[in-house]
């Protein structure tokens, strides 16, 4: 009975360790830390990647000794706890393996707290805003941070994975009084503007600021993010007429992609008349 209880406790402990972290990429893990003073730290077990059981090894973080032996259990709660944990040999100080930990802040309900990304107020306080000028399958996605930092790294991609569903350019930053906005141009591969869309595009944004991690997902159809450029207008003073043509960036043929225009005439007394 005692052996069974020990096995169950060991299994529960192992499951708790698995829940405490998830793999972002090779040797890089994200720790979900509940951002509350009363919440406990996450306990994570590290194992040195060596098959030589007799090899003497030790663990180091930022030149600080963390432990001796093949296995190390660390508690990760705050940002100083995150970073690179390296396993080295005692005799030659050769690096055998490493584990890099990032922290994502969550609340008591397990929801991610975003402090790097700054939300747009419209629509619905979104963190990732995408729009298209036409039906070509080319669109731009934008996101904001409070300040521009050289340490922040962004990855924007489609959740379809590595099948080439959507490709995006490197983000370009523009800073003003409200913060720094990043914009990337994306294109849906093999997109047919004349076909009906059945599956939405799901864009995934990852943000890493040194040891802090955040992400955000946006799902949409191209038809729902269309925002045409302004029309080309011309005013003739001789007879007081205004003419306009479709934006140069709009999809053709115009008979298949029609636009509806609304003209607003403003009189001397600022009275608005809709035509």
Image (cartoon, helix red, strand yellow):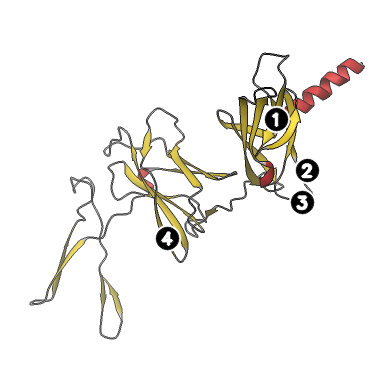
Inter-mark Cα distance, 1 to 4: 42 Å
User: In what element is the residue under mark 4?
Assistant: strand
- Residue depicted at 47% across the width and 59% down the height: 122
Q: Which residue is mark 2?
A: 40
Q: CA distance from mark 4 to mark 2?
A: 38 Å
Dot 2 or dot 1: first in sequence order is 2
**Circle nearer the N terminus (1, 4):** 1
Q: Is residue 77 above or below residue 89?
A: below
**Does the image show residue 196?**
yes
Q: Is residue 242 left or right of residue 12?
A: left
Viewer-nearest of discs 3 and 1: 1
Quadrant, the C terminus: bottom left
Q: Position of residue 234 (x, y in %)?
A: 15, 67
Question: In this figure, what is the number of numbered marks?
Answer: 4
- Residue sitting at 19 percent across and 53 percent down? 248
**Residue located farthest toward the bottom when viewing the structure as drawn:** 269
Q: Residues within 10 Å of mark 3 (few under 14, many from 20)?
A: few
């Amino acid at each position: 009975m005692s052996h069974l209880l020990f096995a169950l406790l060991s299994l529960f402990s192992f499951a708790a360790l698995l829940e405490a972290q998830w793999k972002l990429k090779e040797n890089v893990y994200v720790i979900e830390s509940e951002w509350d003073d009363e919440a406990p730290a996450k306990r994570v077990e590290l194992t040195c990647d060596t098959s030589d059981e007799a090899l003497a090894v030790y663990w180091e973080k930022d030149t600080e000794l963390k432990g001796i032996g093949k296995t190390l259990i660390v508690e990760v709660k705050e940002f100083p706890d995150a970073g690179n944990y390296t396993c080295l040999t005692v005799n030659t100080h050769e690096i055998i393996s490493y584990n890099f930990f990032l922290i994502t802040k969550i609340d008591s309900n397990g929801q991610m707290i975003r402090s790097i990304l700054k939300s747009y107020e419209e629509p619905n306080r979104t963190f990732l805003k995408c729009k298209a000028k036409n039906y070509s399958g080319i669109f731009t996605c934008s996101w904001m941070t409070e300040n521009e930092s050289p340490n922040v790294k962004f990855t924007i991609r489609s959740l379809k994975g590595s099948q080439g569903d959507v490709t995006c350019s490197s983000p370009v930053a523009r800073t003003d009084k409200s913060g720094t906005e990043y914009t990337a141009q994306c294109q849906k591969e093999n997109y047919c503007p004349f076909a009906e869309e059945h599956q939405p595009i799901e864009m995934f944004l990852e943000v890493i600021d040194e040891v802090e991690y955040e992400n955000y997902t946006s799902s949409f159809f191209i038809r729902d993010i269309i925002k045409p450029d302004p029309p080309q207008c011309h005013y003739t003073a001789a007879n007081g007429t205004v003419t306009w043509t479709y934006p140069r960036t709009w999809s053709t043929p115009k008979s298949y992609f029609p636009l509806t225009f609304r003209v607003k005439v403003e009189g001397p007394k600022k009275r608005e008349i809709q035509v």
